[in-house]
Amino acid sequence: MAKGGLNLLLFLGSVREGRIGLRVGKYVQNLLEQRSHKVTVLDPKELNLAQVVKPLHFHKNPAEAPEILQKINKQIKGADGFIVVSPEYNSAFGPALASLMDHFPPASYSYRPSTIVTYAGGALGGIRAAMQLRQYLSELTTVHMPSMIVIPNAPKTLDEEGVLKAESGDLVKSCTKAIDQLEWYAGVLKKGREENPV
């Protein structure tokens, strides 16, 4: 439905040295920007919020919460949709991702779609982390897309700039399908929020 012009947030889920997540994030960001969407990257390593000690919604007066939390919360509430990029660690999604997203209440994410992107060095591409993310994103009250982007052998698939090292028709096809769904849901839900505020 929406062809360009969406305001999207891309969450990175790793803070490790040499993380492949930067490559994956750049790859997906480029695909979205080619469709004229605005993409803002939320990187837990750059934001350096540390572990969740006191989420925004645990402050009696959210206006007195740290300014960085207020700023990110405004970005989340102003987004039309989310892209959640995560590695698979011990068959689970990255703890840095949960720590970043858990700083903010489910109400901030509500009535917006999310697309799951996982990656790994192995052949499964982080699919087990993706299954956990479906439940987690549901708890944050986002509408996660039926189609996901799963990138196996990620270090060999993408270079450091997020460019495919070799032609991968399956990956391109899955990305196209997932982004098409994100655009449709984001457009419909945006229109719904505007016509029937929640």
Image (tube, grey):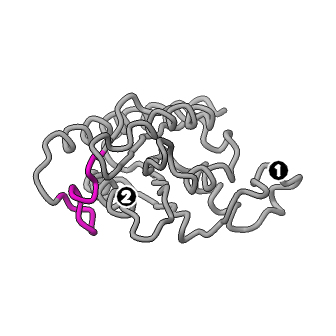
The one nearer the camera, 198 or 62, is 62
Q: Looking at numbered disc 1 in the image, what kind of residue is underneath it?
A: Phe
Whether residue 84 appears in magenta in the rendering, the answer is: no
Whether residue 159 appears in magenta in the rendering, the answer is: yes
Report the Cα–Cα distance between label 1 and label 2: 30 Å
Q: Quadrant of residue 22?
A: bottom left
Q: Position of residue 65 (x, y in %)?
A: 79, 62
Q: Looking at numbered disc 2 in the image, what kind of residue is underneath it?
A: Gly
Could you tell me which residue is drawn at 19 percent across and 38 percent down?
Answer: 173
Q: Name the residue under label 2.
A: 25
For label 2, count other residues whose C-alpha is less than 10 Å away and answer few (under 14), some (14-19) or many (20+).
many
Could you tell me which residue is drawn at 31 percent across and 57 percent down?
Answer: 33
Could you tell me which residue is drawn at 42 percent across and 40 percent down?
Answer: 115
Q: In this view, does 3 lie above or below 54?
A: above
The tag on residue 125 is none
The one nearer the camera, 110 or 91, is 91
Left or right, residue 188 beside residue 151: right
Q: Position of residue 137 (x, y in %)?
A: 55, 37
Q: Mark 1 points at which residue?
A: 58
Give the SS element for disc 2.
Answer: helix
Q: Is residue 163 above or below residue 32?
A: below
For label 1, count other residues whose C-alpha is less than 10 Å away and answer few (under 14), some (14-19) or many (20+).
few
Left or right, residue 35 beside residue 186: left
Most common secondary structure along the magenta stretch: loop
Viewport quadrant of the N terminus = top left
Viewport quadrant of the C terminus = top right
**From which residue to which does the magenta span run?**
151-164
